[in-house]
Image (cartoon, helix red, strand yellow):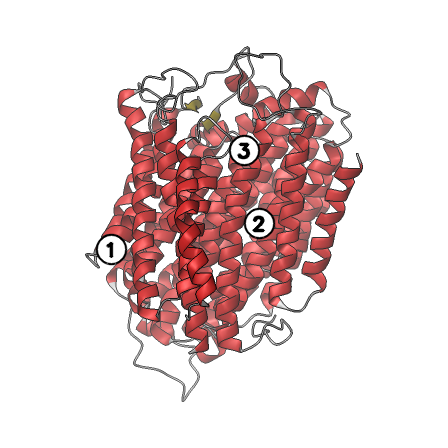
Amino acid sequence: MKGMTVIVKKTTQLIAGIIFLYGIYIILHGHLTPGGGFAGGVIVAGSFILLILAYGSDFLNLVKEERGSTMYENLAILVFLFLGLTGMIAGAGIFFANWLPHGTPGELVSAGFLPLYNIFVGIEVAASILTIFLALVIFKEEVLK
Amino acid sequence: MTVYWLCFILFLVGLYGVITRRNLIKIAISLSVMEFSCFLFLALIGYTEGGVAPIVDTADPVKTYVDPLPQAMVLTAIVIGLATTAMLMAVIIRIYRKYGTFDIREIKNLRG
Amino acid sequence: MMNPLIPLFVAVPLAGAFLTIILGRFITAIPRYMALAVLLFLAFISFWSLVTGGDGSSVYTLGGWEPVEGVPIGLYLIHDGFSALLLCLISLVGLLSVTYSVSYMARYTSENYFYSLFCLMIAGMNGVVLSGDIFNIYVFLEISAISSYALVAFGVEKNELEATLKYQVLGVVASFMILFAIGFIYWSAKTLNIADIRTVFSADYDNSHYLLIQILLLTGFGLKAAIIPFHAWLPDAHSSAPSPISAMLSGVLIKAVGIYVIIRLFFNMFEVTEGMSIVITTLGALSMAVGVFLAIGQWDIKRLLAYHSISQMGYVVMSVGIGMILMARGIRSEVAALAITGGIFHMLNHAAFKGLLFLNAGAIEYSVGTRDLREMGGLAKGMPVTSATSLAASLSISGIPPFNGFFSKLIIIVAAVMGRFYFLALLAVIVSIITLASFMKFQRYAFYNVEPGKIRNDIKEVPVPMLLSMITLAVVCLLLSLLALPGLRETVLSPATDILMDQLKYSSQITGM
């Protein structure tokens, strides 16, 4: 896949980092404000997709990146399940029991497991949307070849 | 009440598109239209006149909140819709590679 | 008391699906053993729960959210007599399909994705069966549906892609109808829990949304279950998938996400009304009759079997519908119980024999390389085990004693006669005879008909894992007929019938009233 013009590249270079940070912000404040793992994860994936679209990438690189993002996706969901299973052990046999201390409502570190769930859902969504994007681009390149 | 009817009409527009269009991409777009009419309907159900986002405000406890459950449902349904659309697109690209066309009239190996 | 095994029915196959991808990247042999281990574990815990559960049902609250003043607020997983049977079915047919796939899928590439999607489909179906919450049913249904779309397309050739496209477009339309209906339910009942919806709806019986919700749900889940006006995708999808997947789709998936949900919702969520039960009975009788007439002219083995799936599902729907009509009229409740028992029993039996028949078809395709009946003949000599097991399955589906199909059809026909539905009873007998004719054709052309000059001596029997799962299913076909015995019927099938017949049992266990 070819990259775009120098204007697009420069703009992307300036804003991609900000988009990424904004996504992280949304993920971390998921239990306090609207948004959360899914919305933030989509924004994070958006910054990666923007970079790939602007700078382009050759076919082998795309395949390599797709393998990497698949790995992250699977690992994140496994950790999520594992966090749910810890509730079975620590929370008297209840799946998804929120057995960590809940803290003061309104603070960043509060609500027990919810910020952790949000973080891993964020990683999972970002990686899976990136995987879908890369897979479709790879399909397109294969058709064009 | 009108907005609910508009949702239903949007649903039927999507269904009409799925039934009548011959191009696979247009069928996928029609399915998305149906999908979004459902989302709109769910979001409208949860709306309350003058409601704010349901985050408990200890300073002002008598605020009106919108119903958060339909919003959670919409979010889940959007995730599912994303997966379905991605799957459909992947299949359509593969079909284009095998058949060399997006026209469903040309894609008719299976009969009977 | 909460049974701590219940969430594992969903969590273990999910974890298996994602671990398969990660570990399969390093060690190529891991995916198949991982899937086997997951399914063995599921089979073990499902039979354990069936045996130890008795007729009591256990409710599991995810995250420990208990009901507040009788109003359920969390997510519930409910393991009762009916879902226990379905869970056993899913894990048994799944286990045998995975055993079969170990040899069958060796000729495909990307085996790790196959096993991963397989586990994901199992997780989705278990979730649908266990969930006590209508929106969660939708979510799990989509998990199983999306993985089955991918599995149908697994060969990535022209036919597979076309079949999966049809399946997917119709499946997505069905999903949106279900989602729309869920929206209406939430609008009018302000709750999503099935038991709670029941209490709200029974207080407000003349709700104007009631009929629209019922029709949308019947259409949506009818499309998933391929009842006759909505059947167009089934023959293509079920015949194009790899054979173990066809066995799963025909044997389990259309029951778990289609028939099961229809039965569950129309008994436990809505009041049983006479109008809707007549519609359901008519659809069942229609698919029973039309399915078999569409099947008789087919020459492609898997298409023939797929059309028979429609017809046999018609038996289940019709029989349950007869029970519903009798319940709605409030007369002869023992006949209604008999009809519902017959329907559920036939559902179990159909999973066994139709799964076996699809595995046989896969074995024939594996050895002979074709699915066209006209190009076969005399395979009985080369493939004795396949021939014998498919004979057992054919006798079973056409209702010949002592195989299981005979007993369930007998119960259905007896219930129809006792309920004074003489026409439906006659129709069931006629359809059964046509099914027999169709399977005699299958047996003759595939295994016995030896035309001079077309004898093939190069046909070999398939590998051991495939034989093993076919023989096991054939034995299961014989053993399931024992469920018709009075002692076993009460312990295994009656809890399922009770939870459907008893109007209050299902909702009282959740709301605690």
Q: Nearer the viewer, mark 3 or mark 1?
A: 3
Q: Quadrant of the C terminus of chain C?
A: top right
A12 vs C96, nearest the viewer: A12
Q: How many numbered circles are shown?
A: 3
A144 vs C197, nearest the viewer: A144
* Disc 3 residue type (three-letter): Ala
Name the mark on residue B72. Answer: 3
Q: Chain of mark 3?
A: B
Label 3 – label 2 distance at C-alpha:
25 Å
* Disc 1 residue type (three-letter): Gly
Q: Are marks 3 and 1 in contact (CB under 8 Å)?
A: no
Disc nearer the start of the sequence (1/2)? 1
Label 2: element kind: helix
Q: Are marks 3 and 2 in contact (CB under 8 Å)?
A: no
Q: Nearer the viewer, mark 3 or mark 2?
A: 3
Let me know if residue C414 appears in the view.
yes
The residue that label 2 is drawn on is C224
Quarter of the rendering containing residue A62: bottom left
Image location (x, y in percent) of residue C430: 64, 55
Quarter of the rendering containing residue C365: bottom left
Let me know if residue C86 appears in the view.
no
Name the mark on residue C24. Answer: 1
Picture layout, residue A34 above or below residue C378: above
Picture layout, residue C207 above or below residue C285: above
In the orientation shown, which residue stands out farthest toward the bottom? C453
